[in-house]
Image (cartoon, rainbow, N blue to C red):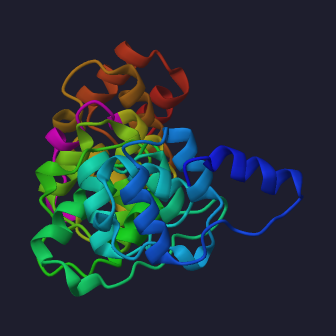
Amino acid sequence: MTHIEDYIAAMEADGSAQPIVLMESVLVDVINEQHGSWTEDQLRDVIERSSDSATIQEIEDVPQPTWPLIVDAGLMAPTVANVSAYALAHGVDERLSGLLVPDEADPIELRDVEEIADQDRGVLAVRVLNASTHLTAQARVHLVMQLNLKSAIELAEVTPSPDQLLASALDAKLLPDTFDTFAHFAKCGWESVSEAFALSENASEFMTPTLLAGFVGEFVESPWIPDELRRMVVERLGDYVPGDDKKALRAAGQFAIANQIWLPLGEIRRLARVTQDPDVVLRQLTY
């Protein structure tokens, strides 16, 4: 196959749509024999023109530099061992992401989950959860749930993201519903925890002013946050909003009026001074 380009050109001129390689063993041999002498484009032409029946079952049977070409062509079997090996070598890049979640489709079913150790599956889980560039939060959680992890995910290794990863993970019971979990994701701001608070079953037990620091206004304004939690903020307004945060104080004042929560005179004076919102202030004073 020294004149592979001529061979492919002849097939195309003939209008043949037949695959060049039909068997996995043949494709593996071709890649191993030619990867050092063919150009990347020549390898790609052969791999892309190979049949689905030539799907490579063990990606480590071929040289690592060729893996992206194989994954790009959809010819790597989606075993957990293959996905783990590829992710270790190349990350959860655009190619692997496209294999795991085809365009406008649900995530694929991973195969042979138990063939690698739980510790290695845990490492892969973190890599997948952190692959926010190419995969949605829901897809990442769906894939990780297939790994059947026996051990807890190392929270410190999960990168907080604003795409509602925490909400998806809580909904799937993938991450614990605790202060530490929320505090870790809250480092990324309001968007990283906004939907998670609505799903949390334990937030009323662990919520603190420190946890909401920086987005109290958004928290109180959000219609998705349970009233019980927003009431906790308003009833301890001095703790949750110790400074003159205009957005937070106005939101608290409006929530208080809507829910017939009557604030202490000192807080009403602070609302008046900071927000200068006569509607909120006057309605509080008429109580």
Answer whether residue 88 is magenta in the image.
Answer: no
Q: Which residues are magenta?
A: 204-216
Q: Is residue 235 visible?
A: no
Answer whether residue 213 is magenta in the image.
Answer: yes
Residue at image x 38%, y 57%? 33
Q: How many marks?
A: 0
The vertical placement of 198 against 191, above or below, is: below
Rendering coords of residue 154 (x, y %) = 12, 59
Rendering coords of residue 20 (x, y %) = 66, 65
Q: Quadrant of residue 268?
A: top left
The vertical placement of 24 against 102, above or below, is: below
Residue at image x 26%, y 61%? 85
Give the quadrant of the N terminus.
bottom right
Q: Is residue 54 visible?
A: yes
Q: Main secondary structure of the magenta part?
A: helix
Residue at image x 44%, y 76%? 25
Rendering coords of residue 37 (x, y %) = 41, 42
Q: Quadrant of residue 128?
A: bottom left
- In this view, the residue farthest toward the front is 2
Give the quadrant of the C terminus.
top left
Viewer-proximal residue among 222 and 74: 74
Viewer-proximal residue among 31 and 99: 31
Residue at image x 76%, y 69%? 18
